[in-house]
Structure formats: C-alpha cells, structure tokens
Image (tube, grey):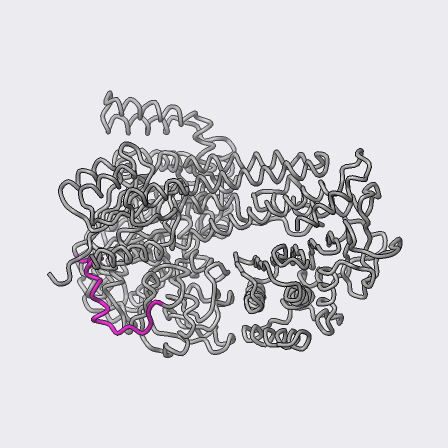
Amino acid sequence: MKNFLQRVGQFFQTKEQTIVPFKLIFADFKKILNLNNQILDLIADANDKLSGDYIFDEQYIHSTCHQLTDLVRELIVLINHLTQQKYSDLYSSFHHIDEKIETILQGVVLCPVKDFILPYSSITRDLIDAVGGKNANLAEIGSVLGFHIPDGFAITTAAFSAFWLENNLEEKVAAIIEQWQQKAISDEEMAWEIQRMIFDSTVPAKLKRDMLDAAGSLSKGKLEATPHFAVRSSAQGEDGISSFAGQYRSCLNIPLKNLPQAYKEVVASLYSPEAMEYRRRKDFRANEIKMSVACQLMISAKTSGVMYSYDPVLPEEETLVISSAWGLGEPIVSGKISTDLFVLDRQPPHAVKEVQVVRKEQSMSLHGSGGIVMESVREEQRTQPSLKNQQLKELAQVGLQLEKYFKKPQDVEFSIDQQDRIIILQSRQLSLQQEQMPRASDLTDISGKYPILMQGKGIAAMKGIASGPVWVLEHDSTLQDFPMGAILVARYASPQLARVIHKASGFITDIGSTTGHLATVAREFRVPALFNTENAITLLKHGQEITLDTESLTVYEGIVHELHYYSFHEEPIEEMYEYRLLRRLLKKIEPLNLFDPRDENFTPKGCQTYHDLTRFVHEKAVETIIDLNFYHTHQRDTQAGQLLWSYPLDLILIDVGGGIEGEHDKGIRPEQIRSIPMQTLLHGMSHPGIWDMSPMKVDFGSFMSSLTKTPPTGNSRPEDVGRNLAVISAEYTNINFRLGYHFTVIDAYLSDNILDNHIYFRFSGGVTDTVRRSRRTSLLNKILSHYDFLCEQHGDIIVARLKRMNKESMLKRLFLLGMLIGFTRQLDVKMVSDATISVYFEQIKTIMEESYGK
Amino acid sequence: MASEQTSILILDDEPIVSKRLKPSLEKKGYEVETFTSSADALKRVTERKFNIVITDLKMDGVDGMQFLTEVKEKYPDTEVIVITGFATMATAKESFNRGGFDFLAKPFKLGEIAEVISRAEEKIKNK
C-alpha cells in the first residue's frame, strides 16, 4: 500500500502546481466515503439500541448525537472544499437540523408537524408527539383495528405552542411556579392563578379559524341540524403507561361557536393541583408538557360503560368486567350513578359468568341547546340490563383485541349509539392490583412447573412475553389464514410476516436478523420476537400452546400465567424517558427523504435529516469527481474515459496510474483495462447469464422502470444519469455504483504483498418493497460469509470486509463481487419467495466452483 | 442454606440503568438493591455485605473508583463490576489495579452483563 501511494505521489510531483492534484482531490473523496460509512453505522447502531436489549443512558444519547453532528458537519465542509463551496446551502439545512436535535436533547418535545389540526383519518402512532396518546390510540383503533370511533380531529401540540407563545404563557406560568417554589403561595393558589391566566388568554386567530373549519366540515352531511362536540384532553403521557386517568377536563355537547372557549378550559386543566402533583410523581419534565386536545362529534348514547379486559382485583380469575348504564358515560366514569355489572370469561366464547342488574334511576343525556342534563330513567327501563348478551360478547372480543394490540390489560370507555353500534371512546392501560403480582423472584422456579421446549437459542428482536397457540407458516400464501392471538413460527424473518403484526402475539423464526424490517415493525408494535433459533420450526408443533419469553430466550409449554402478570406489572422499557428521547431524536436523524438525484427535492434545501445530508453529499462527491476528470480536462494528472461495454453500465473510469493502456479518446474498451481488480470485477459482472440482458418483467411499477431504463450513452451529462465511477490504478480500484436504486461501494487493493491487500464492499438497497429487499440482503450475507468476508448488516446495508489474503484468493472474491453486482440488478425481481435464497446461493456457489475450483 | 441467593448492589446515577437491570436480574434469581446516589450506597454497604457490586464511574460526590476502593477494603471477596460511558484504557486499568473484577463500557447488552455476573459468581463460589 505504501508503495502505491508513494508511486502516486511521485507521479503527481512532476505536474504543474497551479492545478489541485488529483491525489488531493481523491484524498478528500475518500474521506467523504469514510465519513459516510461512519455516519450510517452510527445511525444503525443507535436504532438498534431501541430493541430493549441494551442498557444505555442519557449520556450515550448525547454523545451519539454530538458525534453524528460532528461527522455530518465535517462531511459538509469536505464537499464544499471539494467543490469550491458549491453546496454552501447545506450549512443552513444542517444548522436547522442540528438546532432541532439540540432542542430535543434538552428534553423539549417538538411537534413533528406544523398543522394545528389533524383529522383522525390522518393520524398514526408516529404523530403521538403532535396529538397525544389518547388521540393517537383512538385514531389507530379506528384505522388499524377497524372499530367505530367518534368522528373527530386532534388540535395538535403545535397549536398549543402557538397559543402559549401568543399569550407569553411560558414566562407567566414559570413566574407563578417560582412563587410557589418559594412557598409564597399554596398549591391551590398556584393552580388557580395559572388557570385564570389561561382563561384570560386569546386563542390565536388562525387556530380559531382552523378549529371552526374542521368542526364545520365534520358535521357536514350529518343528520343533526346543529352539531355538538366533545372536547377532551390528549396530553403527553396520558394513555401511555402513566395514565393520567381523570386528571384533565372534558367538555361535553359543546356548540360549534363555543369550541375556542372549551379548548381553553381543557388546556387550563393541565394546571389542576392533582395533575401537577401527578406529573411531579411520574418524573415528567416541564418541557414535555404540551397538550393536544381531541375534538369529536358528540355521540348520543343509548348506553355507555367501562370495560376492563382483566378483573383488576382478581386477575387470576381470567375474567373481564363490564359496567354500564343508560345514557352518556360521564356519570359512570366519575362514579355518580350505579351501574350494571357483567363478568365474562376471557376465553372465547366469553360465557357470561356473573350479572348484577341494578335499579337505574337517573341517566345523563344531551341537552338540546348544548351541555348535558341528568334525567329520570323511564320506569320500564330502570330494572332492565343496559347491555344485551350479544353486545356483551362483542364487547369482550373488542376488549381482547385492544389488549393484544396495546400489550397491556385495557380500561376501555365505550358507548352504544342510536344505531346500536359499539363506539370506542378511549382505551388506556389498566393497572392490575399490585398485591396479586408475582414478584420477579417468584419467577425463578417456573422452569420447574412448565416444561421447557427451547432455551438459550436465538436472538431477541423484541423483548417481552407472549403466549398462544403455535401457527407454523408452511407457504406464504397461507398467511391470510393466520388466526388472532397465535404465535407465528416461520423459517425466515421475512418482512411480509409484518402483515399479521396486528394479529400475532409473537414471532419465532429459524433465521433472521434483529436489524431487519420485521424486527423494526415488531418493536414498533411491541410484539415479542425471537429470531435465529435455527430449528424452532421443527421443535414446535402447529396448534401447541406455548409461552415465549424472549428476554430469557425460553419457550415454555403451556400458558405461563405468572409471567404474564409479571409483564403486565413491569414498566415497559420503551416508555422510559431515555427511549422516548432517542426515538424523537432518530426522527431527525434516520429517515431518508432523498432517493433519486433526478427528483426535484434532491437539493440541499430538501435535506430534512442527517441521513438526507449524508446521501446528498455522497451523490455530489461522486458527481464532482466524474465532472472534474471526465467532462473537464484540466486534470492532467489523470486519464479518464467512459467504459465501452456491451452491457448497459454507464461507467466513468479515472486512471491514476497504470490502470488503462492505449488511446481512449472515444472511450475505453474492456481489454484496455490494466487494473487487475477492475478487470476481475468486470469479468465477474459479464459472466454468462449474470447480467440478464432480456427485458425484465415489470411487476412493481416505478422501481423497475428506473432499473430497466438504460442511461443514454454519448454526451450524456452526469446530471442526467446515475453516477457510476471507478478510480483505478494498476493495483487499485475504488468503485461507486448506482444501479437502479442499489448503491454499491467497493474499495480494493491487490498486490503481491499480502499485508496490503484488502477488499471493502458496501451494498445498500433503495426504495423497493421491503420483502424482496430483505431476501436480497439475506442472500448477500449468506454468500459473502461463505466466502470468508466479515459481514455486518445494518438494516438494508451490508458491509463486507476482507483483508490479508493472497492475490489469488482476493481475485476469486473480486470475481464473486462482480458477479453479485451484475446479479443483484435482477435479484429483487426474481426473489419471489424465501426459498429462492438457497436456490441462488447454490447457483452462485456452482459458478464459483466451475470458475475457480472447490 | 443450600441455595443462598447471590446479592447484588447496583449504583448508577442515571436511574434507567437500575430500572432496566433490576427486574432482569431478579428474574434470574438474584437479590438486587439499587442506588442512584453514591452516598446512600456507601451507607448501605456499611450495614451489609453484597456478593457483587455493579458501579458506574462518573458520579457526583464519591465517584465509582472511590466506591470500588471502599468496597474492596471492607469486603475483599466482594466482586466489583465497573460500568461506564467514558471508557478508556486508563480507567479500565485503574479499576483492575484497585481490584475490580471486570469493566464494561456503556451501552452494553443485558446478555453481556449477565455473563460477567455469572463469571463473578463462579469466582466467588470457587474461593
């Protein structure tokens, strides 16, 4: 290696000094590649920390973010150095992101959207910081689980911040809290002062307008002549593990014009003495307190009630409890009226085990002009049960599905509307009574009570306890028959399994990685997942009841209730402050919004995350090197030309010494290449059948169209086509390929000195569907590991390294890489099932053995 | 008692460390006490002995290195595992010199610390 650099150095010394020697430019370029790799690895590692398998603290989060910030800044400095400040706009995008990251690091919850209003139909779990737990849960119950929820929208935390800012409330509230801290005023006085201040504040004009518009369009096409609304709190942390049950105010049956006033009332309840005390106990940081509000069309309820998916006092009875009464739910929740009580078996068909029908004298109903009113119940209804048997069973099914989905026993508020539909008003975690909880130390002897089917095998992709019947996946097509609550056992952790994420209690696979797509989804939906068990599919029998504990890597026969109660009692790790913080930060770091350099948003301004910035810089670095050496001839210390090849690979070769032979004015023919690594790679790529020339079947739209599009040859400018660049010398090759949406980087040095020899290979996918992408990654991993590469997999990225092998062994492996580059171009299309992984593995092995012997 | 529980003291000023480690170790059958202040932890070790101590290094007041030294002075056969987010060769060396059993850089996996603990247990048993 030293020789090579010395030689390159000597070569450049003879050149004129006015031109920046390519050696220096290339050094910058390699630094950029190196930074690029470091950044992507750090991001992937940080994401991995969310698996629950790591002990990390705030200090780690801070240092990782600062490390990333430093690396990205360096990257931007370098690309501007390389391009004479052509991309100085990157600095402002960078500062913008950096500023947000710093703010989040200080514990401030930033609203991920600018909108003041978000309709339920557009809310997903990702927006929890904007809409609060209650809104986010309810929206998902509607959109994911498909249950009826009230029509409505969320007034976001962005609206809250605008309200706060316009009225200078932060300062005013802080001043009052300070008085209280100095004991100048009592708890009640503080609460009253703050609330009064909020009532006296003005709702910003835009917020008022947006609120009234959204409410107006909600009521369009509804039968009620004058629609009324329920306005409820949906604060940070509410409905999560810290269930601020009943801490905040709800305003019922509010006429449209009074919505702004109701909004202020609900927001003011953030500062009730109880709510403030509760937050203090739960370690909520002052910065985290921002309230989103729910605004829903008021439901005229025949019956309302509360359902507990477990009896909180006697969980071991395995029953669920429903209490209900006529009319609206408010007096039921606050315990003002007596209710009917129904106890049902948790197991289907949910036999009714106990019924207590009470005499119901009063009910709450809607008042015509707004507000609510207590009325006398008609005599004949007083002693009738407020729910029918069929409704009870339906409710039980709903309750268990909610429990499965939210991973904890649920406390569900519901109403039965005038059309006899069950409407879910709220679902939140139910705390079971602590005395009933087995302590962790009691769990040590469960292995004596339940037979162990599997232990110590595999890796936990998501921590947790799951139990249910085993459901073995035989064919992909049978996935649609997957039953609710079963544990899916499959050969591969294929992303398509994510389709049953809402039904599955757990996942167990023979093969799979904790950084793949399924792992990410399992973590998002908190479904316990155990991958890489090698032979679960043969050990576990279809239909067999099991309990999976991924933390201890154990599968028990039967349902281990002790573990379940324990897990209900445990604070979910993902609800801890550090996890919330890391998740918020990663949203500013990890998502990739820039894919295609031809897209309009592929600009410094379009960069919204550190990943975007990194991607942008890499693309432009490659472009710059090509531009300098190929389109402009001022680089006299290099030779450059386009490869003339029968395959549609638009490749610019830059020779820094001994890589090319002969004239190359009209392009470089493959036989002119003297660079041994480059020669071998091309040899592999052009192996018969590897580079499929036939038009490929287009089966997933735009992705394929970009793949099959052959870049125009001739005078095409780098702006028009993908950048494919190879910097070569006799013994060295550095390649940056973009084929369709695949990115490949190879850095290889090959000489007679074993100590200097190395191959670095990085492959990443693009925007294709995740199922095939993951098959491709699995295949690459399998092949590369088989041929002695040290492989690391971070999500879709594969990094493979090889060092210090003799020339012959290195050549063989470069041939393999060439083959893989050509081959992966078509892989996504051809990998139609998981079984193709082994088929292609064997095929490639055969070709290798034919070419190089066993 | 034939099956006496191994006792573990965890000291880290960031609460998440104890919160995460305690249930996981208790499930494995260990007896665990946790502290976020080194003064409280010091007080506790004057009251009783722990078989294994897991301590962070960088803390306000008495730091982890001092705590390690004090524990080893009082109970030479207690094994001390040092965990830190600022891992350097020098600190690792120093903790070994002061009689530390092992040194783990944060963040680490649950499995990694479990493995270190069971090695420490093994050593205690074989004494």
In the rendered image, residue A611, in percent from the top left (x then y), is placed at: 57, 46
Q: Work out which quarter of the rendered image holds the C terminus of chain A and state it.
A: bottom right
In the rendered image, residue A137, in percent from the top left (x then y), is placed at: 40, 52
What residue do we see at 43% from left, 70% from top? A509
Residue A386 against residue A832 in the figure, above or below: above
In the rendered image, residue A303, in percent from the top left (x then y), is placed at: 30, 57
In the drawing, does residue A315 fall left or right of residue B106?
left
Whether residue A106 appears in this view of the structure is: yes
Q: Quadrant of residue A547?
A: bottom left
Q: In the rendered structure, does residue A451 fall within the stretch colored magenta?
A: yes
A564 or A796, nearer to the observer: A796
Residue A443 against residue A589 in the figure, above or below: below
Q: In the rendered structure, does residue A802 fall within the stretch colored magenta?
A: no
In the drawing, does residue A628 fall left or right of residue A204?
right
A88 or A258, nearer to the observer: A88
Callout count: 0
In the drawing, does residue A426 fall left or right of residue A826?
left
In the rendered image, residue A100, in percent from the top left (x then y), is placed at: 51, 36
Range covered by the magenta-colored residues: A436-456
Residue A506 against residue A764 in the figure, above or below: below
What residue do we see at 41% from left, 72% from top? A489
A269 or A663, nearer to the observer: A663
Whether residue A375 appears in this view of the structure is: no
Q: Residue furthest left?
A: B1
What residue do we see at 21% from left, 47% from top? B33
